[in-house]
Image (cartoon, rainbow, N blue to C red):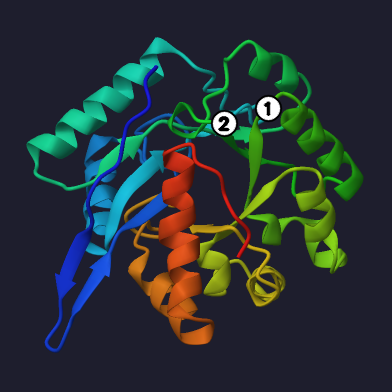
Amino acid sequence: MQAISIVGCIKRKDSLCIIIYCMYDIHCHLMPGVDDGADNMEETIQMAQLAASGGTKGIAVTPHCRIPGSYQNLWSQRLEDTLSRMRSELDRRGIPIILFSGQEVFLAAGFLELLKEQKLITINHSRYLLVEFDFYESGASACQKLRQIAAEGYVPIVAHPERYAFFAAHSDAEVHIKAAGALLQVNKGSLKGSFGRTAFHTAHRLLDKRMADFVASDGHSPYVRTPFLRDVHEIINERYSADYADYLLKSNPSKVIENDRIYQY
């Protein structure tokens, strides 16, 4: 298991200016046939093409891990080999996307032992681990689990916090989650209203308060919930600032990939 380094950016030439996109997507279900993301390699390729066309430079491939009664996807040579085949196929087709390893780990009972045994895959083998909860998990339980991960020297990144009931119910939930040592990754779809009014308002609350650390696609297919990120970069640029859009979609994700320290906005 080896980390991959990142270099370079993607440029898109418009009629009056050159817009530089160098985005990194740290949450995407791109691996074929392992969860509810891409069904096969052809869908993987279509998703990667969409991502590249939207200015994404690199993607952390994050299959669901340990969903109760469903996807397990603990570290295995099969997952490593599949990721290698994906890289080869993108290279063969000339798609300029760098793929990084990862998982979206559901924090069910026993997760800490698996983390200690290195059976969970951090993003690009860094100290950053993408995690999720049951949508109705209590805030107290979530904080306890996050503190356990932090105590092992890892930095948990909470996927789509805006979709959890305790975030919607408590306007200071993000303060407690961050005090437990976690960072927050908001979904592109939530900022666009794709997951309903509650998730939309909670997601924008996190950005309004500058408490979000990342925005990612949580891409699942080339048809809906796609990994195309240019549109959400433009939304954040217009509603907040270009600097904050770059912070959420470029600089912070790239620091995760490189295992660098994240600074609060």
Residue with the mark numbered 1:
153
Can you give x and y, in whole percent of width and height, for residue 156 in the image?
66, 39
In this view of the protein, can residue 82 be seen by the observer? yes
Can you give x and y, in whole percent of width and height, for residue 98 in the image?
27, 41
The amino acid pointed to by label 1 is Gly
Can you give x and y, in whole percent of width and height, for residue 144 in the image?
86, 36
Residue with the mark numbered 2:
127
Can you give x and y, in whole percent of width and height, for residue 25 in the image?
41, 51
The one nearer the camera, 168 or 23, is 23
The one nearer the camera, 234 or 175, is 175
Distance, label 2 to label 1, CA atoms, is: 7 Å
Quarter of the image where the N terminus is located: top left
Q: Which residue is pictured at 30% across the width and 41% down the height? A: 6
Q: Which residue is pictured at 43% across the width and 32% down the height? A: 124
Q: Secondary structure at mark 1?
A: loop
Q: Is residue 118 left or right of residue 39?
A: right
Q: Which residue is pictured at 32% across the width and 47% down the height? A: 58
Q: Which quadrant would residue 78 be assigned to in this image?
A: top left
